[in-house]
Amino acid sequence: KNEVEQSPQNLTAQEGEFITINCSYSVGISALHWLQQHPGGGIVSLFMLSSGKKKHGRLIATINIQEKHSSLHITASHPRDSAVYICAVSRGNEKLTFGTGTRLTIIP
Amino acid sequence: DAMVIQNPRYQVTQFGKPVTLSCSQTLNHNVMYWYQQKSSQAPKLLFHYYDKDFNNEADTPDNFQSRRPNTSFCFLDIRSPGLGDAAMYLCATSREGVSGYTFGSGTRLTVV
């Protein structure tokens, strides 16, 4: 079993829909990261969380340390949000452990 | 803007011909990482530097080497690329204990 699990693996939605991607982890962490990768592209760091909630534009990330669970929400989704979203955790030594990613497709 | 820059963006090399990928950063981050990402897979850490201290992952093949001549630059050398080394190579930086990660745009390596 992976230390970091994401769901769903694939998600297709209509433009404007509210999107939720979930991440569960099974190890102690110092921080959880949400990353975005467009097809054939590099990785962009969206959020780093150790507690609570962060918001940036239409993106919101939450984390529940007790339940070892995090969610990434996208409000008013747009086709340019289509990408792979990766949850990753770091544990003191700074190295990242990655989830398997969620491929999001937003249809106009 | 402070950033992580990888060159080249695309690299085609011949089977067995040494190739070097480069990464530079203007963030003054003390930790630099090289990841290998194959199609539809999560990135795999090859090695990382804390300042000048090199840390190799146990399963990184000897074919992969790295150099960090100063804080700003880090190189990935593949001594004898095989077809299985075709992948996206990602450089990332962080400041130990403080910041999140900043990733470069990656170098897509093709081996022919």
Image (spheres, rainbow, N blue to C red):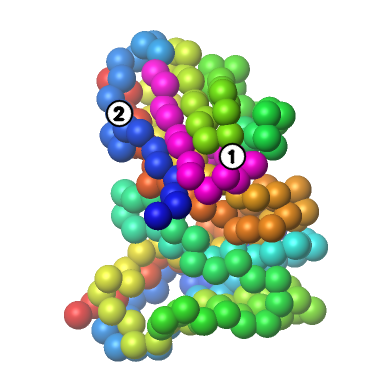
Tell me where residue B39 appears, x and y as whole percent.
Answer: 39, 44
- Look at the numbered discs 1 and 2 and tell me whether their residues touch, using CB distance below 8 Å: no
Given residues B41 and A37, the one toward you in this image is: A37
Tell me where residue B79 appears, x and y as whole percent.
Answer: 47, 13
Q: Nearer the viewer, mark 1 or mark 2?
A: 1
**Residue B11, labelled with which disc?**
2
Judge left or right: residue A89 versus residue B6.
Answer: right
| Disc 1: host chain | B
The secondary element bearing badge 2 is classed as strand
Quadrant where the N terminus of chain B is found in the figure: bottom left
| Disc 2: host chain | B
Quadrant where the C terminus of chain B is found in the figure: top left
Tell me where residue A103 appears, x and y as whole percent.
Answer: 40, 65
Question: What residue lies at 77% left-to-right and 54% top-to-bottom?
Answer: A92
Q: Quadrant of residue B46?
A: top right
Question: What residue lies at 49% left-to-right and 67% top-to-bottom?
Answer: A46
Question: What residue lies at 39% left-to-right and 38% top-to-bottom?
Answer: B6
User: How many labels, in total?
Assistant: 2
Question: Compared to A24, does A42 lie above or below?
Answer: above
Q: Is residue B21 magenta?
A: yes
- Mark 1, Cα crowd under 10 Å, few <14 / some 14-19 / many 20+, is many
Q: Is residue A16 magenta?
A: no
Q: What span is in magenta?
A: B19-40
Judge left or right: residue A92 versus residue A53.
Answer: right
Q: Quadrant of residue B68?
A: top right
Give amino acid for label 2.
Gln
Tell me where residue B44 appears, x and y as whole percent.
Answer: 56, 41
Question: Compared to A83, does B15 lie above or below?
Answer: above
- Mark 2, Cα crowd under 10 Å, few <14 / some 14-19 / many 20+, is some
Give amino acid for label 1.
Met
